[in-house]
Amino acid sequence: MKQTRLLIAEDDKALAALLLEYLSEGDYDVTVCHRGDDALALLKQHSYDLVLTDIVMPGADGLTLLAEVKHQDKHTFVILMTGYSGIEDALHAVEQGAYDFVSKPFQLPEIRVRLDNAARYQKLLQRWNRVNGKANTMASDMFIPQKVEVNSSSRPMGVARRAYGLRGSE
């Protein structure tokens, strides 16, 4: 079975080394860089299945990497991680095309699960594209907003309502 090509962009060298050691034991071919501009250079030279990037880094930030990935290779999934952000930043990152978002500190098994889920979804999407003859379908093309009936007697959901696009009694 082909290993999943993973680029990790993390300026904390200890965390990057820990992620490299932990994820290299599995189905990942891991490349690590410690600066955003170095990650940008690698993205121009190589293709990756997944990118795990810190948002705050020297050289270029994680959102810049996300934009470059979306510009170059719409089939690469990006997972952003940060110790400085909250739910609003996570929603903003996902709106810009990130597959997932994780806050630091995190447990290593949590990162493995998130990466494994992304890799499985990516493979299913590629298989679906082959079966249906659609070579260039992106993950974002698969999500079709649907009108959801909301029971007027239900309690307001606040953040969840905004996150999932439910507005009032639409």
Image (cartoon, rainbow, N blue to C red):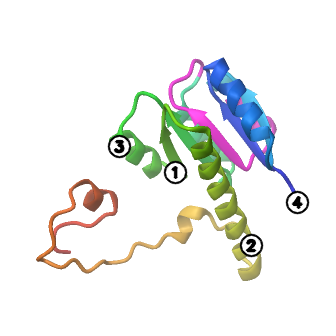
The mark closer to the camera, 1 or 4, is 4
Q: CA distance from mark 3 to mark 1?
A: 15 Å
Determine the CA span between mark 1 and mark 2.
21 Å
Which one is earlier in the sequence, the residue at label 1 or at label 2? 1
Task: Give the label, 2 or 4, closer to the camera.
Answer: 4
| Distance between mark 3 and mark 2 Cα atoms | 32 Å
The local crowd at label 2, few if under 14, some if 14 to 19, many if 20 or more residues have their Cα within 10 Å, is some
Earlier residue among tags 3 and 1: 3
Instruction: Tell me the mark number nearer the camera, choosing from 3 and 2.
Output: 3
Question: Element under label 1?
Answer: loop
Q: Is residue 109 visible?
A: yes
Q: Which mark is residue 127?
A: 2
Q: Disc 3, disc 2: CB below 8 Å?
A: no
Q: Which residue lies under the disc numbered 3?
A: 87
Which numbered dot is residue 97? Answer: 1
Which amino acid type corresponds to the residue marked 4 in the rendered image?
Met
* Residue at the image point whose x is 33% and y is 57% from the top: 163
Q: Residues within 10 Å of mark 4 (few under 14, many from 20)?
A: few
Q: Secondary structure at mark 2?
A: helix
Label 3 crowding class (10 Å Cα cut-off): few <14, some 14-19, many 20+? Answer: few
Marks 2 and 4, the one that precedes in the sequence: 4
- Depth-wise, is mark 1 or mark 2 nearer the camera? 2
Q: Which residues are magenta?
A: 39-59
Where, quadrant-wise, is the C terminus in this rendering? bottom left
| Of marks 3 and 1, the one in the foreground | 3
| Residue type highlighted by circle 2 | Arg
As measured in the structure, the alpha-carbon distance from the residue carrying label 2 to the one carrying label 4 is 15 Å
Label 3's element? Answer: helix
